[in-house]
Image (cartoon, helix red, strand yellow):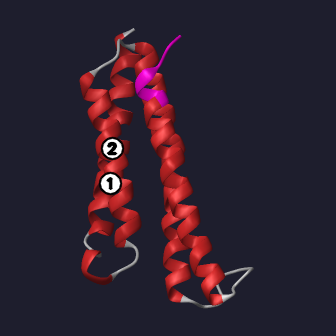
Amino acid sequence: MYLPITLTAAAAAAFINLWLTLRVGMVRTTRKISIGDGGDEELIRRMRAQANFIENTPIVLILIAAIEASRPASGWLAGVALVYTLGRVAHGIGMDGGPLKGGRPLGTLITMATLLGLAVWAVTIALDR
């Protein structure tokens, strides 16, 4: 079974996770904080951005894979995966605060809408069988 949308979304997720991990590591190195957060707000924000990504992305990828396996490849599903990916980047940037802090609520909204939309889509597929 070939799932190109899932493969692409998972690869994008791996790159985003690597980016988020490197951002945490950069602050750790600069501030010489090896374990924990040292009470450093920037490190806490970056750690939470990565943790939030890890909390949500697996279920999104599972739903994308299940939907793609149940139905032929769909432009809609690819679009959802793309929007989710962009939302997670916006959230990561927004977690730093500053002038781009609006990315955080945007990323959160996109994540919640993606989870809800994919869950409803999956249930409709399950009930259609």
Residue 114: assigned label? 2
Horizontally, residue 91 falls left or right of residue 76, namely right
Kindly tell me whether residue 79 is visible in this rendering: yes
Give coordinates of residue 121: x percent, y percent.
Answer: 33, 28
Q: Mark 2 is on which residue type?
A: Thr
Camera-side residue of 48 and 27: 27
Q: Which residue is mark 1?
A: 87
| Residue drawn at (38%, 43%) of the image | 115
Give coordinates of residue 62: x percent, y percent.
Answer: 51, 33
Instruction: Give the quarter of the figure containing the C terminus.
Output: top left
Horizontally, residue 13 falls left or right of residue 120, namely right
Camera-side residue of 108 and 98: 98
| Residue drawn at (37%, 13%) of the image | 71
Task: Tell me, yes or no, whether the highlighted magenta stretch contains residue 6.
Answer: yes
24 is higher (above) or lower (below) than 83: below
Give coordinates of residue 43: x percent, y percent.
Answer: 55, 81
107 is higher (above) or lower (below) than 116: below
User: Which quadrant would residue 36 be assigned to in this image?
Assistant: bottom right
50 is higher (above) or lower (below) than 99: above
Camera-side residue of 78 and 58: 78
Task: Tell me, yes or no, whether the highlighted magenta stretch contains residue 28.
Answer: no
Would you call the spot at circle 2 few (<14 residues within 10 Å), some (14-19), or many (20 or more)? some
Give coordinates of residue 91: x percent, y percent.
Answer: 36, 63
Horizontally, residue 109 falls left or right of residue 23, namely left
Q: Which region is colored magenta?
A: 1-7
Disc 2 is placed on an element classified as helix
Chain-order first, disc 2 or disc 1: 1
Q: Are marks 2 and 1 in contact (CB under 8 Å)?
A: yes
Q: Mark 1 is on which residue type?
A: Gly
Kindly tell me whether residue 112 is visible in this rendering: no
Determine the CA span between mark 2 and mark 1: 10 Å
